[in-house]
Structures are given as structure tokens and as C-alpha cells.
Amino acid sequence: MKKIIFLGLAMLFATLSFAQNNRSTAEVFVQIVNPGKYNVYLDDELVGSANGRFRFYDVYNTAPVLSIIQGNTVILKQRIRVIPQQRIVLSFEDKRLITLKQLTIYRNRQYALNDFDGYTGDYNTGIVPPPPAVPELNYRLLSDEAFQTFLSQYKKESFDDGRTRMINVVSKNASLLSAQARVLLKSFAFDDERLKVARNLYKTVADPQNYFTLSDIFVFKSNKDDFLKYLENQ
């Protein structure tokens, strides 16, 4: 019975991945709250701004390095994870990078976003760019609907080893959000197994900048410390 469940899950997420639209670039927008003059790089691309808002379009790399430089000082250099066909809006304040929003770029085959962090009012107007030919990517963000389908099967597992196998299935076909990973990991009975799976999930999570928020799900302080130390070394 378990083999049938795992096969069904694998087919579900493979179908979700295949069904994605071919417009596979992403956008990364960054706002810097503290006043000052900054240079912001995404990998090797430099963007300037007079108002503290920096916009990167046509991002093909799903795990680019974001660098923020003030004067001659690098104040942030961090790898982020972006999702094809989505705009991620980030805010840098008090030396922390946080995710404000993740927005779907296209609706009804039309460009649906405004100048920075919201949708336009009318989805029937906009730019309809031709779909570029780009290579298929390994990971797709797991939608809320697909996650709930997975979660209903996941809750039927009574033991940590079964939960681990199911998480391995979904993480091979899709990227989870930190909040989704939190829901799955909190159900583990043993803290050591929770730590092991949390480390593995970090490699494919869609918003690694928020993954530190999982630190409070560990029962033992030693495991919490090991988890945070692992994140520091990434």
C-alpha cells in the first residue's frame, strides 16, 4: 500500500512540474530601508537606485548570490532561492534580509505586476511576451493545493521513518516553503530524526532566508544549536 502511495505522490509532483508555463524567468526586487548610497549585485548584474529600491528582471539562475555594498564595504552577501515565473520582494533592514512578498508574474497569459510589490488592477491588459525557450528546471514551488494533498497522506504515517520517506519523495520533485517544512517537521516524534531531515530539506527549500525560524521546533537545546550552526556554515 505504501508503494502505491509513494508512486502516486511522485506522479502528482512530476505532473505539477511538467505543467508549468514556459515563461521560466523570475524577478528579484530589493528595498533597503536605511538611507544611504548602495550598489546591489545579483550574481554579476549590478543595479543602482536613487530611492533604495533595486529591480532585477529576467533572472534565470534559481539560486543567485545577492550582494549589497555600501561604499567599499560588503554588508550582505547571501545566496537566495527564486522561483520561475515569480517576483520575490526582499527587504534589507537592521542587517537582516527578509522576504516581504512572492508574486506570480503572469495571470491569464499577461504580465500582472505593478512597479514594485503588487498586482495591477486589470488582468486583461498588459504585456504578453513570447515564451522564451529555456531549459527545464529541477525544482518547482509546491502550491498550497498540492501541499494540502500531500499533507493529507502524510498525516496517515505513524512513524518517523515513514514521514522521512514521504518528505524525500516530495523534495525530489518540488521546493517547500519554510512554513510548510515547519508543519511537516513538528510531527516528528524524535528530535534527532527531525534534525537530520531539517538539514536535508534546507538544500531545496524555496526561501532559505527564512529557514532559521524553524529553530524553535526542536525539543533539545543541543539539537537547536546544531541546527543553527548548520545554517551558519551554509
Image: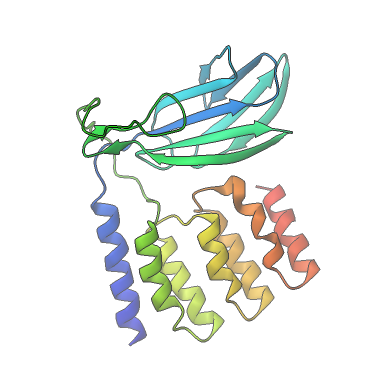
What is the quadrant of residue 84 in the picture? Answer: top left
In the rendered image, residue 100, in percent from the top left (x then y), is placed at 55, 39
Camera-side residue of 25 and 125: 125
Depth check: 57 or 53 in front?
A: 53
Q: Give the residue drawn at x 25%, y 60%.
A: 15
Q: Picture quarter containing residue 201?
A: bottom right
Residue with the most extreme right position? 221
Q: How is the image coloured?
A: rainbow
- Give the percent coordinates (x, y) of residue 13: 32, 62
The outermost residue toward the front is 121
Residue drawn at 46 percent across, 68 percent down? 168
Q: Position of residue 174 (x, y in %)?
A: 39, 57
| Left or right of residue 101, residue 57 in this image | left
Q: How many marks?
A: 0
Q: Residue at x 35, y 34 (%)?
A: 25
Residue 152 appears at what percent x and percent y? 40, 76
Which residue occupies 61% across, 53% down? 211
Q: Quadrant of the N terminus?
A: bottom left
